[in-house]
Image (cartoon, coloured by chain):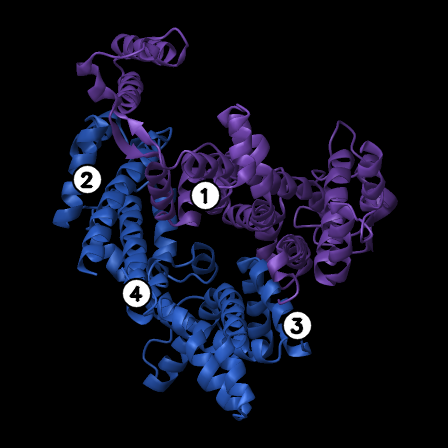
Chain colours: A purple, B blue
Amino acid sequence: MNTENTAPAAPLEEPAAPRRTRFEEFWRLLRKNSLALAGLVVFGLFLATAVAGVFLTSGSKPVLDPSVVRLQEKLRPPLSRSDAASLKPDEIPAMGVYLFGTDDLGRDVFARMLQGAWVSLTVGFVAVGISVAIGIFMGAIAGYYGQQYVRLEQVMLAAWLLGGAALLAAGVRTLGAVVLVAGHAWLFFSISPWGVSRRKSPPPWMRIFLKGTIRVDTIIMRFVDIMLCFPSFFLILTVVALLPASIYTIMIVIGLTSWEGTARFVRAEFLSLREQDFVAAARALGVGNFRIIFRHMTPNAIAPVLVSATIGIASAILTEAGLSFLGFGVPPPHATWGNILSDGKRFIFDAPWLTFIPGAAILLVVLAFNLFGEGLRDILNPKLRQRN
Amino acid sequence: MIAFIGRSIVQKIITLFFVSIVSFAIIHLAPGEPSQVDPLNPKFTPEMVERFRTAFHLDQPLYVQYAYFYRDLFRGSTVSWKDNQPVLKKIWERFLNSLPLFIVGTLITWTISFPVGIRSAIFRGGIYDRSATFISYVLISIPGFFFAYILIILVVTQLEVPVIGMQTFGIGDTAWPFRIMDRLWHMLLPSILGATGGIAVLSRYVRSQMLEVEGQDYVRTARAKGLPWEMVHYKHALRNALLPFVTMFGLILPGLIGGSVIIESIFSWPGMGRMAYEAILSRDYPLILTINFIAAVLVLIGTFVSDVLYVLVDPRIRL
């Protein structure tokens, strides 16, 4: 009996078709899409440039110093040699050549571009990281817990805590602190296993506090609607202008204002994933809710997130460049591609390279991310693969 | 239908209420105060600052300020902190300046993207389609300010036409054909720049809509029964592909108040975007909040109109 069963099973273990790993399949499809491949190559070059830029332009004695001012060598065209006679030895650029020329203060544009590459890179990735994290979290909660109601006691607790915070902010320190501490104690007892709410049956008058008020999904999606009402560049500009200028403010603000799209389609994915068998199986095994959300469901919903994240990086880089161009963002001595262009625009007819080099760099990098993102969309979505 | 309209109006009003709270909170919880904008100005004595704070209710708690602000807004009596002008009048003046840019930009967007998108879909995979796709990616990716300078260099050096501002300085009392041509030249570049992103996105969307319809059975039937190809494409396919675009009339509405900050500052165009930018720089809270509120109203009206239009044009949607 046993031998009979194993004998016919053996040939079945041989795969019918040559088996490819997921990565090989991905690579095969990517190679067919030449634009997306070009995007990936440019992205790799950009990454290498930005990392090299950090090493070459920072430290106490950088190889390429972006901040050396040489007034006698201002507005030199690209590839011009520096005049060694009029410069101090430590002011001579590496190899004695201004690869991208100099600006109106005689600073080496090549060094400044290298320095700026890191800003663009980090703004793009950190901002998108923040927005994707918020988007996945909000979308997952809305999709997974969507049909459950928030209980009245929870609304009251939230109102209590908000009230405490408002009191603190309004200046009533002691009362605010007391309210906050009481609220946290309430929170602690309601979620801890020996807490009040776990008692077998609450008295009838307490049932009213367990009544549902509003759906989780409704709260989150209405919040998304509210956020979408703000014109986003205007909102970013307002917040960046009101807060002290720093690169981190920009990253955080861009991240906090661009998560709505991600949240929407993560929610849509979760609504369909929730009904699938593997989720039911995980639940039957007693896997915790958060483990189901983040270990089991999120990896299955990640493909559209990757696509929108790639395109989001492109638009975050554009937004940062626009803010730098308007004079917000990284404070002046530090170079970004946007502020090189913004400084150079006054010399647009005499020194066009000050406009064209950063502009072309931004265009190239953003284009690369957009092309790669669109390619990724075609590759990761089997439905689009053959038809369009 | 009536129930749907009623429900969504109530929903939008609730959303608007929360938008007003959130925007008010964002702007007032930011560090610093509007009375501290210019601390070095000798005219700003502490007494002046105190008078200013009392006059604009800045010494009251936030929720009182909120109530005052929106009461004034609905009465239409909000004044700018910068020059004491009524906010709505300022916005209206700037809006009239931005409106021609918006109209010309929208016309350019729609007249270019439809032919391009339809042609790409019909000759799908051909050299025209591929180059149109690539160009639209370039147009999405190019920073507006960089593109603006390329165009300025081209126009100024090749055509020798002045383009900055709303009209050439000192054109005052020339004959009206000259003035009209001058105005058109000055409007051209900002409108094209405002339209670039729209052209790229809309032409891609037209293409994908058209492709989807071309794959339908009734188009295959039309082709199979031997209709001439222009009849198949333009009568059977195109008419159905155009359906979703009716709803876009609602979605372009928010663009009315958008007015690109960057492009208007490059071209010194005294429009909405520039005014918003200046208001932010001088912390003119009433102006910022009013612009924000109007923008939110337009977004909500826009989605409402597009929902209703969608129901009207698509008989498959039943409420």
The answer to whether the residues at label 4 and label 1 have Cβ atoms under 8 Å apart is no
Q: What type is the residue that disc 4 sits on?
A: Val
- Residue B117 locus on image (x, y percent): 53, 74
Figure quadrant of the C terminus of chain B: bottom left
> Circle 1 marks a residue in which chain?
A
Circle on res. A271: 1
Q: Are marks 3 and 2 on the same chain?
A: yes
**In the rendered image, which residue does mark 3 sit on?**
B130
Label 3: which secondary element: helix
Is residue B290 depicted above or below B153 in this figure? above
The span from disc 4 to disc 1 (Cα, nearest Å) is: 25 Å
Between marks 4 and 2 in the image, the one whose residue lies nearer the viewer: 4
> Circle 4 marks a residue in which chain?
B
Q: In this view, does B235 lie to the left or right of B314?
A: right
Label 2: which secondary element: helix
The span from disc 3 to disc 4 (Cα, nearest Å) is: 35 Å
- Residue B220 locus on image (x, y percent): 54, 81
Residue occupying the far right of the picture: A95
**In the rendered image, which residue does mark 4 sit on?**
B311
